[in-house]
Amino acid sequence: MKLKAKLTVGIGFLFIVILVFGILGIVSISKLSNDADKILKNNYETLVYNNNMLKALDELPNSQQAYADFETNLENQEKNITEYGEEDATKQLRSGFEEIKKHPQNNDSYKQLRQAIQQINTINQNAILRKNENAQKSASSAIFWLTIVFSVLTIISFTLTVNFPDVISTPVKALAKGIKEIANKNYKNRIHLDQEDEFKELADAINTMTEKLDEYENSNLAKITFEKRRIETIINQMRDGIIGFDEHKNILFLNVVSEKVLALKEKDIIGQYAPDIALQNDLMRRLLQDEDQHELKIYADNKESYFNKDVLKVSNEGKVIGEVIVLRNITPFHELNEAKTNFIATVSHELKTPISSIKMSLQLLRSTNTGLLNEEQALLVESIKDDSNRLLKITGELLNMSQVETGNIQLNIQLCSPFDILKYAVEAVKVQAEQKHITLITNTSDDLPNVKADKEKTAWVLINFLTNAIRYSPENGDVVIEINKHDQHVTFSVKDNGKGIEAKYISKIFDRYFQIPGTSKTGTGLGLAISKEFIEAQGGTIHVESKYGVGSNFYFNLMS
């Protein structure tokens, strides 16, 4: 039965109960009222009329009012004859009254009237008793049937009261329980209702939805599991270390490389608070620090390894929900760079011996002891000499760069005079300046303090500045050398009036092997890079200021 039909039956039954009780009550009350009305209207009124006539009879024949009252009540009685035998007694009463009106002193007539009135009263009193008994029987019958109907309806109503709420509450509870299971992702649960109504249809619909959710969940779970395993495989195959954290810095995962680097096992620390792990793991503590760590030197795989640390924030709809630390393994690049540096150092070192032999041979050729050279031969010898000097300079720069890259810069830092450094550098480039008719102008303070520096390498830097200034200055130009004291350091600067450097190249000017496009390719592009390393190794700073088309100013600062 449908729920609507059940509700209709229940409410309909209540309506019938009310209707039956109402009809029975109305019928019973109407019948009792009708019986009472008959007693009151038919019999009681007659008794009243008779009593009035008896009072008037006592006043006859002396009162005319008594005649009128008797006549009035007699007429009312004649209109209210309702019982058997009452009519004859009333006629006798009329006959006696008419006789009295003719013969007022006839006592027999008075006696006749009293007997007639008494007879009418007796008839009506008996009728009242009879009707009262009938009314009591009707009341008893009504009570009996109302009691039976009430009992039956009470039993049925009690049964409905006890059982009907279960018709609603039982399926609702089953549906609520099933929906809670779905909310808890228990998609295997089903709702079973043994009834054919709207609740059953709803339960079937929920079961169908749960089945689809179960299929979808299993499908998604399989996909997610597959993707998770694939990602884990990819991460574990990477040569980079990867560590994942949630938004509260709890460890979510780390790959094989991270396990080796940290000397920890993922299964032992998964889900733990990273700062707690860092208390007993120095590397974890370094990784959790916010400051930039461009390169980490870590002992891993029984050798020194190098890693770059990158921190990647994981966001969802603008909210950070975690982060991933990636340790990029740059060890192979270090190894290649070291091999390259060793190769350059070896080659440069090996080249110095034959170049020195070439220079010695050139010196012998220029000597008159081995014979005179004609003009063409002398030019060739000078050309070979220039090339030898250039090769010697290149090999020297490569050797210096090898020292820089391997961290083997040998510094002999001591207090030395800025004037000595200046004099050494100027003497080294004097011939080169004279060849281009360049005037070297020096501006120095008289009270310059000594500087803490490696005299040879500082002079090498200043010579490099001067060489570049002379190379890029026009003939008959000027190169200004200034040495000044500023606070706790001394500044060495070299200014030229060459074509200057474009702004886009300023930031790259001290990079290794960088050469400004369009300039001479005779150098290696290492001079300024080596200069920067030499100065910074001594605790100083190096800078450049340039305006394209006007000239450049290279300068460095050393502590006094």
Image (cartoon, helix red, strand yellow):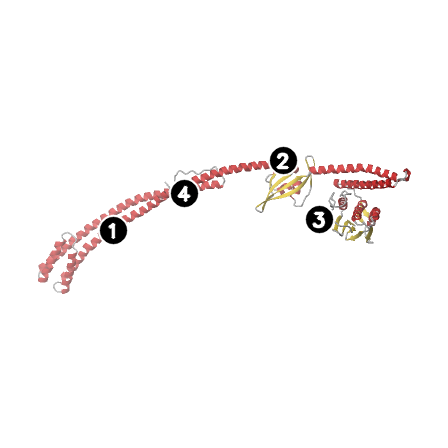
**Residue 66 sits above or below residue 39 on the image:** below
Whichever of callouts 1 and 2 sits on the residue coming sooner in the sequence is: 1
Whichever of callouts 4 and 3 sits on the residue coming sooner in the sequence is: 4
Labels 3, 2: front one:
3
Residue under numbered circle 4: 169
- Horizontal and vertical percent position of residue 491: 78, 51
Cα–Cα gap, marks 1 and 2: 101 Å
Cα–Cα gap, marks 4 and 2: 59 Å
Residue under numbered circle 2: 237
Q: Quadrant of residue 12?
A: top left
SS for callout 2: helix
SS for callout 3: helix
If the image is split into quadrants, where does the N terminus sit?
Answer: top left
Whichever of callouts 1 and 3 sits on the residue coming sooner in the sequence is: 1
**Residue 61 sits above or below residue 442 on the image:** below
- Amino acid at pointer 3: Lys
Q: Answer with left or right where residue 434 lies relative to residue 18.
A: right
- Amino acid at pointer 1: Ser
Cα–Cα gap, marks 1 and 3: 117 Å
SS for callout 4: helix
- Amino acid at pointer 4: Ser
Q: Answer with left or right where residue 47 lies relative to residue 538.
A: left
- Horizontal and vertical percent position of residue 220: 53, 38
SS for callout 1: helix
Whichever of callouts 4 and 2 sits on the residue coming sooner in the sequence is: 4
Residue under numbered circle 3: 504
**Which mark, by number, is residue 30?**
1
